């Protein structure tokens, strides 16, 4: 099994991001016409940099966060930034 060593740089230097939104239903159990804008962050700096197949520009890493500000999770999650650079 391969081990993964994270450097201080990988953990302390978050990638820049774009903030985007999509509309989603407010209550999925009792659907109404009410919606809200769900915020998500994206960085595509490394898309296509290590493509292994012609039709696949590389893996997509998804981190769903927790119950808190998403930008705080982005800044503190060095593991995802490390994986994006590596793969």
Image (tube, helix red, strand yellow):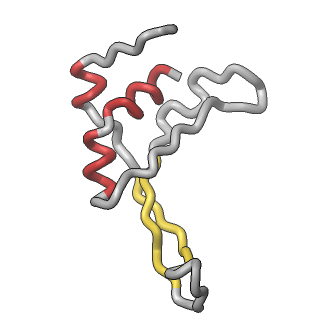
Count the numbered circles shown: 0
Q: Measured along the vertical axis of the image, is residue 41 above or below residue 10?
A: below
Q: Residue at x 34, y 13 (%)?
A: 5
Counting from the top left corner in percent of width and height, residue 66 is at: 36, 55
Direction front: furthest residue = 29
Q: Nearer the viewer, residue 71 or 67?
A: 67
Q: Residue at x 27, y 28 (%)?
A: 11
Q: Measured along the vertical axis of the image, is residue 71 above or below residue 75?
A: below
Counting from the top left corner in percent of width and height, residue 52 is at: 69, 20
Tell me which corner region of the image, top left, top right, bottom left or bottom right, holds residue 75: top left
Counting from the top left corner in percent of width and height, residue 50 is at: 59, 21
Counting from the top left corner in percent of width and height, residue 14 is at: 30, 36
Direction bottom: furthest residue = 33
Q: Nearer the viewer, residue 5 or 15?
A: 5
- Left or right, 86 with reference to 48: left
Q: Residue at x 52, y 81 (%)?
A: 27
- Left or right, 31 with reference to 17: right
Q: Nearer the viewer, residue 65 or 37?
A: 65
Tell me which corner region of the image, top left, top right, bottom left or bottom right, holds residue 51: top right
Q: Residue at x 66, y 31 (%)?
A: 57
- Left or right, 52 with reference to 81: right
Q: Nearer the viewer, residue 73 or 30?
A: 30
Q: Measured along the vertical axis of the image, is residue 9 above or below residue 62?
A: above
Q: Measured along the vertical axis of the image, is residue 28 above or below residue 63?
A: below
């Amino acid at each position: 099994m391969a081990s993964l060593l994270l450097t201080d740089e990988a953990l302390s230097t978050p990638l820049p991001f774009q903030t985007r939104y999509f509309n989603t239903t407010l209550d999925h159990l009792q659907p109404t016409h009410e919606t809200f804008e769900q915020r998500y962050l994206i960085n595509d700096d490394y898309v296509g940099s290590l493509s292994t197949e012609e039709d696949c520009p590389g893996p997509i890493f998804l981190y769903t966060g927790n119950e808190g500000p998403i930008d705080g999770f982005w800044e503190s999650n060095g593991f995802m930034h490390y994986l994006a650079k590596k793969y």
